[in-house]
């Protein structure tokens, strides 16, 4: 049923809703979607497989329809909890499991600073009213019999933005901490946290363009697309995008080429910089290390840069970014990015659009996609940006500055590097920050994640026609990737 | 005069980059950089015909390093002199 398309059935369920909502958007029947979509996915006569009864399943699906149509507009965050879908996972904290042998040493009891552990009936017992969750007992147990049980969402959130609401027991997101990386969206086993979608906006944009008559809609695709849609060729995905009504498909990697030239110059000039490509990382700095905000590169992200270039060639155009990233849905709404990007879709949402329009990629001719260099393309994986900046310095013959990049793979590594940087203890002068582990290929909006993804990105990079960043970026005829028009 | 050079994927693979370089070179050679505005364009709708450029409203297809001088003389120089 799920096939090889998605990693989990939650994604598959979300996709089914997105696909049905997209169909409604195309037939101008969105007003009926709230009633029709749940009935289509869970028709009369089916047995409940996900929740206690089909009526609750339909109620949850109704909420998913709401997310697919843009979610709660009062909430500025695109990452939102569907309260009714949250299963209120028990939060038991540290628990003694069946491996406890009721030994004589009682290291757990001895080490506990709060006296929360007693031995009853030859087994350790934790009094949760006393336990403070320090974890010392778990670390000393010779049988590893004590383990920590946390909610998957809280566990996934490495910035501490999710807590249980004490009264409702539902997950609750603190928008002052959330960086919209989407890792909770991907990890919640009940699909109770979702990234609100702009898919109906994109459908409207495409339809009103009347096949590029009124204006042209450009699709900007992230280089991580090389790890997605594995059932078809990349050239067929390009054809599919054009079949959806996009006038042209442009690589975000071209924006990456523009950025690495400009960012490397800025780095040499200022002596210390953090990257600005990953919107979740940038948001993390602003929210947690405000003193380092002025160290963020003044360049737009590759998405913003290529959008700026496209708009310079065609001011009436609309630009839709398609990628693996939920945080891009926040980034494009920033005042400095809004002029260049009109909407954002994830790969999950693109797949739903293909299926809603019954576009079978495997039956299409292969179109071509080539706008960027090897270095622009490898931005999709951790370490790629640092490689590109070093190469850009070399190409521009900036030899009096030695880049010492600190590659941060995932937001936890970013936190450590920023912490050191804030105390002037960082052994490096350039922080490459990627909130997702492995980089963009680990993004929450990917259809699937696999161990071969990095190799696929590198391989895609090697296929690029232009071998140098300068050659690739030359086609932009000097459009600057810096903020501002 | 406005010249647009297609940098869409098809044209790019057929050598838009070289044409941009030649165009800049020739405009400099004839001291026309002030009179001619060169821009990029994503797809001029003639993807199968080689690198495509647009000189004001006129589309010229199949531009290559081999025929560039002739294209430049016929479609750019002749109109400016």
Image (tube, coloured by chain):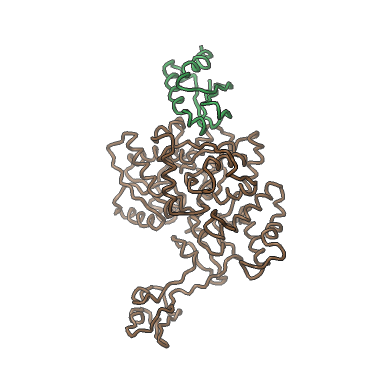
Chain colours: A brown, B green
**Residue B50 x, y percent position in the rendering:** 52, 26
Between residue A474 and residue A234, name the one nearer to us: A234
* Side of B38 where A430 appears, left or right: left
Q: In this rendering, does residue A77 appear at all?
A: no
Q: In this rendering, does residue A223 appear at all?
A: yes
* Side of A389 where A352 appears, left or right: right
| Residue lying farthest to the top in this orientation | B81
**Residue A265 figure quarter:** top left
Q: Quadrant of the N terminus of chain A?
A: bottom right
**Residue A227 x, y percent position in the rendering:** 48, 48
Position of B26 relative to A374 (above/below): above
Between residue A1 and residue A374, name the one nearer to us: A1
Position of A351 relative to A111 (above/below): above
**Residue A394 x, y percent position in the rendering:** 32, 36
Q: Which residue is at a point 54% across and 45% down the rendered structure image? A: A232
**Residue A352 x, y percent position in the rendering:** 60, 50
Position of B75 relative to A464 (above/below): above
Position of A143 relative to A283 (above/below): below
Q: Which residue is at a point 62% across and 42% down the rendered structure image? A: A244
**Residue A256 figure quarter:** top left
């Amino acid at each position: 049923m799920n096939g090889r398309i998605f990693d989990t059935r939650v994604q598959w369920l979300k996709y089914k809703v997105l696909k049905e909502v997209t169909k409604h958007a195309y037939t101008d029947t969105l007003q009926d979607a709230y009633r029709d979509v749940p009935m289509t996915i869970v028709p009369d006569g089916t047995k409940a497989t996900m929740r206690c009864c089909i009526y609750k399943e339909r109620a949850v699906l109704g909420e998913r329809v709401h997310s697919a149509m843009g979610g709660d507009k009062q909430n500025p965050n695109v990452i939102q909890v569907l309260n009714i879908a949250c299963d209120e996972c028990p939060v038991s904290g540290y628990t003694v499991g069946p491996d406890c042998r009721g030994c004589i040493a009682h290291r757990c009891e001895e080490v506990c600073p709060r006296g929360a552990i007693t031995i009853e009936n030859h087994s350790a017992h934790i009094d949760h009213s006393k336990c403070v969750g320090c974890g010392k007992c778990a670390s000393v147990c010779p049988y590893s019999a004590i383990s920590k049980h946390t909610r998957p969402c809280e566990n996934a959130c490495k910035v501490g933005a999710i807590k249980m609401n004490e009264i409702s027991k539902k997950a609750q997101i603190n928008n002052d901490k959330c960086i919209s990386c989407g890792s909770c969206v991907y990890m919640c086993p009940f699909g109770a946290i979702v990234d609100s979608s702009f898919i109906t906006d994109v459908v409207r944009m495409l339809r009103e363009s009347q096949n590029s008559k009124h204006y042209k809609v450009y699709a900007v695709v992230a280089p991580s697309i090389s790890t997605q849609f594995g059932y078809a060729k990349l050239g067929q995905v390009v054809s599919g995008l054009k079949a959806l009504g996009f006038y042209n498909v442009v690589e975000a990697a071209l924006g990456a080429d523009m950025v690495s030239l400009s960012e490397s110059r800025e780095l040499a000039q200022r002596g210390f910089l953090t990257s600005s490509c990953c919107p979740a990382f940038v948001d993390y700095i602003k929210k947690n290390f405000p003193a380092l905000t002025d160290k963020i590169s003044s360049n737009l992200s590759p998405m913003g840069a290529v959008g700026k270039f496209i708009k310079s060639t065609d001011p009436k155009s609309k630009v839709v970014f398609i990628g693996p990233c939920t945080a891009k849905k926040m980034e494009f709404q920033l005042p400095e990015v809004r002029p260049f990007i009109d909407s954002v879709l994830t790969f999950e949402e693109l797949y739903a659009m293909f299926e809603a329009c019954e576009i079978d990629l495997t039956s299409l001719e292969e179109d071509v996609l080539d706008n960027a260099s090897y270095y622009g393309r490898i931005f999709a994986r951790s370490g790629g940006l640092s490689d590109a900046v070093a190469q850009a310095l070399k190409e521009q013959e900036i030899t009096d500055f030695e880049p010492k990049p600190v590659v941060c793979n995932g937001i936890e590594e970013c936190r450590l590097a920023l912490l050191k940087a804030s105390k002037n203890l960082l052994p490096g002068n350039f922080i490459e920050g990627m909130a997702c582990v492995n980089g963009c290929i680990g993004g929450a909006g990917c259809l699937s994640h696999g161990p071969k993804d990095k190799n696929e990105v590198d391989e895609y990079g090697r296929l690029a026609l232009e071998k140098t960043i300068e050659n690739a970026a030359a086609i932009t005829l000097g459009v600057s990737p810096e903020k501002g028009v | 005069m406005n010249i647009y050079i297609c940098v869409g994927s098809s044209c790019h693979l057929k050598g838009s980059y070289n044409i941009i370089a030649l165009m800049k070179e020739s405009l400099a050679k004839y001291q026309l950089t002030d009179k001619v505005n060169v821009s990029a364009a994503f797809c001029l709708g003639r993807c199968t015909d080689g690198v495509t450029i647009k000189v004001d409203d006129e589309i010229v297809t199949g531009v290559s390093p081999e025929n560039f001088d002739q294209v430049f003389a016929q479609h750019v120089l002749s109109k400016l002199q």
